Image: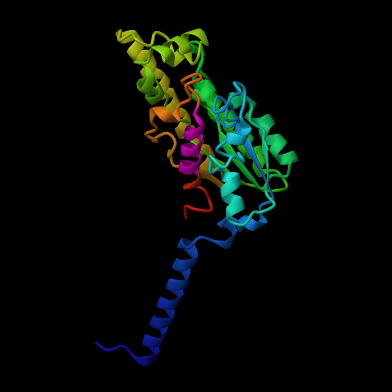
Amino acid sequence: MRSSPGARRALAALAAATIVLAGTLFAPSAASAAPPPATITKMAALGDSITLGSMSCSSLLSCPANSWSTGTSTSVPSHLRSLRAAGATSLVGYNNAVAGATSGALATQAQAAVNQQAQYVTIEIGANDACTSTVGAMTPTATFKTNVQNALAALAAGSASPEIFVASIPNLQRMYDLNKSSISARLTWGLLRICQSMLANPTSTKAADVQRRTDVQTRVNEYNTALAEACAATAKCRFDGNAVANLAFVKSDISTRDYFHPSLSGQATFARTTWAKTQWVTP
């Protein structure tokens, strides 16, 4: 049965309207797109000693020039250097990370970023929530998530309305597995009492010790899920999709100063892995 010319025109108009509507629903809006790099003049890094670049140079406390986020070293393709290369030539970076910081300290760091009028903020937090003296001392996952949510809310409420990037937590089990056979690593872990929830009794294969390590990594996995959920609920926030958590880093990516923190090459690996997941690279 043939339709009338008027009916055909009505159908064509309806189809066109449907296409426009579909494009409106599924295409990214201008409001959700990251601003051009050239417009970013201030960025801030939040987190712990990983973001401070600790153990990646002669200093045992911090090496911020080597930071994956705001570092200026030519050996590390940091987010700051990548943004500058993309047009943010006047970009200034503030590193608000604090060695030993847990998620409970994140809100204070976030407020500092708000006061600095940072337009881009990176977050790497959680290792110290899991790396405690015992499994029982680890931060409960619910508490961790609340801490992260509070920090993200503070950033989102800031007048600069920053783009936010949240990195997942590295795999602590892999860090242990890579160096558990090293006498130097085991001595260092013991002498410095590093991450004993994971690294105590490193040569033990007893069921209790194997289970303890599994419990720590399980908690880290829970933290990463919490980071993803908190970020997804926050405007202008991008999670790395567990890129760092799933990273198959190698021995050379771990500092031989403490066999725990990223080395200089580890910071570079961290920078490349995370930059590829930012608002300016991943659609």
Residue 271 part of the magenta segment = yes
Q: Which residue is painted at 53% across and 53% down in the image?
A: 280
Instruction: Judge from the rendering whether residue 206 lies leftward or rightward of residue 276; answer left or right.
Output: left
In the rendered view, would you say 207 is above or below 95? above
Q: Which residues are magenta?
A: 262-274
Main secondary-structure element of the magenta-colored stretch: helix
The single residue placed furthest to the right in the displayed view is 115
Residue 70 part of the magenta segment = no
In the rendered view, would you say 39 is above or below 179? below
Please tell me which residue lies in front, 67 or 174.
67
In the rendered view, would you say 12 is above or below 111? below
Picture quadrant where residue 145 is located: top right
The single residue placed furthest to the bottom in the displayed view is 5
Q: Is residue 240 visible?
A: no
- Residue 158, image x and y in percent? 71, 44
- Residue 265, image x and y in percent? 47, 34
Instruction: Judge from the rendering whether residue 40 lies leftward or rightward of residue 7; answer left or right.
Output: right
Instruction: Judge from the rendering whether residue 240 lies leftward or rightward of residue 98; answer left or right.
Output: left
Picture quadrant where residue 36 is located: bottom right
Q: Is residue 227 visible?
A: yes
- Residue 37, image x and y in percent? 61, 55
In the rendered view, would you say 242 is above or below 2? above
- Residue 222, image x and y in percent? 44, 28
